[in-house]
Amino acid sequence: MREKLKSKTISILKWLWIAVVLVAAVIYFSRNFNNVETYFHLLKPGRIFLSLILMLAAKSLFALVSRFSVQAEGWNPSYIQMFSIYALTQLAKYLPGGVWHHVGRFGVYRSKEMSNSKAGKAMILENIWLVASAFAVGFSIFLLIKPNMAAMILDQDIPYYLLRPAGAVVLAVWLLGMYLLQRFITDNEQKKCPDPMAVSISLTLAWILVGSSFYVLFPYDFQADLPTAIGGFAISWAVGFLAIFAPGGLGIREFLLSFMFSSSLSPELAPVLATFHRLIWVTSEIILGLLFSLPIFSFPLVNKTLSPENTQDKYQE
């Protein structure tokens, strides 16, 4: 009886949480739609749909990286289970404070009987992976392919023949750091510790997909190319992520994107484009949150996770 009441209470709270997030999303959309209304009418629906599909594909890879992080600490959930945890907890990041999705994720990990230490290390590892990969992918693309953008961001007059080798160095340092990080932070005795190369490839593909979802929203006469969009978005995301005072990097990401593309977009269109892509980003998270709130995803996964025979999820300090 107590278990049924607990399950029902959790279900009610989950749907109440989804309702609160939807209300917040409606408020956000209404406040920003006036800024993008003109551009919205000029953009073909097919490009909006393509941008959303690319974003959802990127999210599926970010969920895979989340799974890698808990595998490094010994818990081995199914991919769908981890995707549902990722999708539901991401909705909390738009609350004031910008840390509630971390709090929610930590609570979920603890509910799976991960110790405080293991849950904390898994989250630290994942966030280091995300931020480091965003900077590494962004700067290596600029240094190797678009050295003029790298010089603009660094605000230094550096010869291009020096910048391109630096791009290779950035990639090498990042990959070496991935191996060292896993060696010294994670539990090395765990047999299912993920391959750092698999993590690196997943993150690289994720940033390419996110940058591509941004690029397909560009006007046809936009002068920059896909590498610029990928590198610019990855760097702006990382800076916005580190700005913990801005929930979800709101405002920070848009400002940096406007700055990076100011030379090829009008001052009026650059922030509009960045804001419109933010709407795509938020929409993708709402879609995933609603999808994984359906009973077909939640209840079977909870039952499977808490079953007595599933001993691989049990932890001790």
Image (spheres, grey):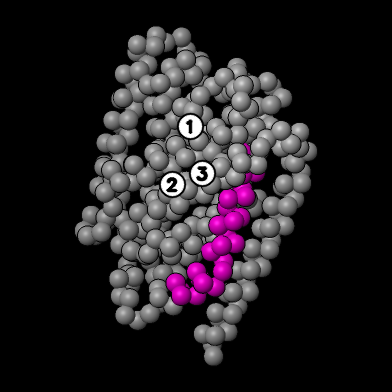
Q: Nearer the viewer, mark 2 or mark 1?
A: 1
User: The residue under label 1 is which amino acid type?
Assistant: Ile
Magenta stretch holds residue 23: no
Amino acid tagged 2:
Asn
SS class, disc 3: helix
Q: Nearer the viewer, mark 2 or mark 3?
A: 3
Within the image, what quadrant is residue 13 found in? bottom right
Task: Determine which residue is flagged by label 3.
Answer: 54
**Which label was assigned to residue 230?**
1
- Label 1 secondary element: helix
**66, above or below 165, in the image:** below
Circles 2, 1 touching at the beta carbon (< 8 Å): no
In the rendered image, the vertical position of residue 81 relative to residue 265, given as above or below: below
Magenta part of the chain: 277-302
Split into 4 quadrants, where in the image is the N terminus? bottom right
N-terminal of the pair, mark 2 or mark 3, is: 3
Give residue 186's mark.
none
